[in-house]
Amino acid sequence: MATIKPFKGLRPPKELIEKVASRPYDVLNSDEARAEAEGNEMSLYHIIKPEIDFPVGTDEHDERVYAKAAENFNKFQEKGWLVQDKKDCYYIYAQTMNGKTQYGLVVGAYVPDYMNGTIKKHELTRRDKEEDRMKHVRVTNANVEPVFFAYPDNKVIDDIVARYTAGQPVYDFTAPNDGFRHRMWIIDNDNDISRITDTFAGIKSLYIADGHHRSAAAALVGAEKARNNPSHKGDEEYNYFMAVCFPANQLTVIDYNRVVRDLNGMTTEQFLKALDEHFIVERKDGQYRPQRLHNFALYIDKTWYSLTARPGTYDDSDPIGVLDVTISSHYILDELLGIKDLRSDKRIDFVGGIRGLGELERRVDSGEMRLALALYPVTMKQIMDIADTGNIMPPKTTWFEPKLRSGLIIHKLD
């Protein structure tokens, strides 16, 4: 059962929220962060992308860069750009994209729950990426950016959230680079806090939707602090890390598409003929988007095709075998194009569906790529089924949108 707690959030004064808030560290590169933070000393990028305070080209993993993160974090607090709440609270974070709003609870998630599998994963993590974020947590002694969890829908939580969100939010702004609306409310009533804590204690599992590396780093540093503290009791703040928990039925998982540089020695005609063994191939007029599970869209030579997987290429009773990424990885990328490892092969790249089919056309028409493959998005049920059975999704399967905005709230570990 899930253990959560409220915490004293460290956050910007209302009038500074739009200056401080930023995109997450891993959705933009150093140059983009430098451009977005230009002329704004209050931008959170000075803490989460502190290489922007060094000359262009400085390695973001340089020890001086991590030290700068800690220095800037202290500076933000000293200048009053980040102020800690006086009591432990839960927070409601709402995101609105294309007219649809999802409401998440900002909580302290329990480190042992991550270690024992109550907090479930569906992706593999890379140790180098974990270590990078672990260093950041260590030097700041804080979870500066939240992770993104899902939980099974719960009416008690829905009702509490609905009551608070009927009132005025403490933050309400539209982010300039994505056009999405971000709002936050504070739950500081002791009875409501107790009800939320008790209700989550009856929820069997929490699911990492987005932020596997941040989750791993936060939990591993928490466990490290517990081991290194001779008087560890188990109720210290470092036993918890910051997560935004959304009801699974509110979340939007969008497609995560593939572009490939060459046809592995084949002509277009040979490639289309080879596809026919495992797919029904139909030429389309104009852009084509996959219509259902096991239907794909191929773009090649300025033409769109529908590919429908033939029976026998998938197993709908197997949580991995049912996935379209499994079908396309095996029968197209591996068998025909010779791409064995999606994580390391330089002939393939991945494009989040938020960029639209036009971005796939652009990458191919420019000559950079030879073909694009658009996939039907996975569902939250598929993600939860995979996590529940202890399976791991193939790489680059899920893309959640909107992304959590960083800087609305921070969790200190002391």
Image (tube, rainbow, N blue to C red):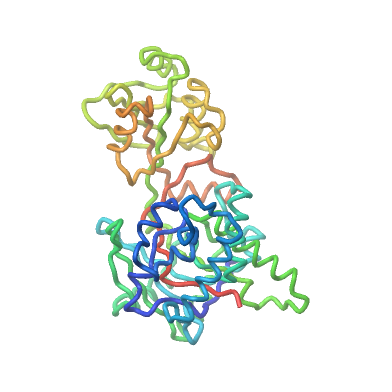
Q: Is residue 252 left or right of residue 339?
A: left
Against 118, residue 346 (above or below) is above
Residue 19 appears left or right of 122: left
Residue most toward the left? Answer: 285
Front-most of residues 160 and 94: 94
Residue 375: horizontal and vertical position, in percent?
39, 36
Residue 15 position within the rendered picture, expressed as x and y whole percent measured from the top left:
32, 78
228 left or right of 322 in image: right
The residue furthest front is 55
Between 76 and 376, which is closer to the camera in this rendering? 76
Q: Residue at coordinates 54% horizontally, 43% vertically from top-left?
A: 393
Indicate the quadrant containing the C terminus: top left, top right, bottom left or bottom right: bottom right
Q: Is residue 140 above or below residue 32?
A: below
Q: Is residue 379 above or below residue 195?
A: above
Percent coordinates x, y for residue 123 in the rendering: 55, 47
Tell me the quarter of the picture where residue 373 sits. Answer: top left
Task: Name the image quarter holding residue 114.
Answer: bottom right
Which residue sits at x=55%, y=35%?
A: 344
Q: Residue 26 location in percent, x, y?
A: 47, 53
Along the viewing direction, whichever of 171 and 90 lies nearer the viewer: 171
Residue 403 in sight in this render: yes
Q: Residue at the spot x=46%, y=25% of the render? A: 332
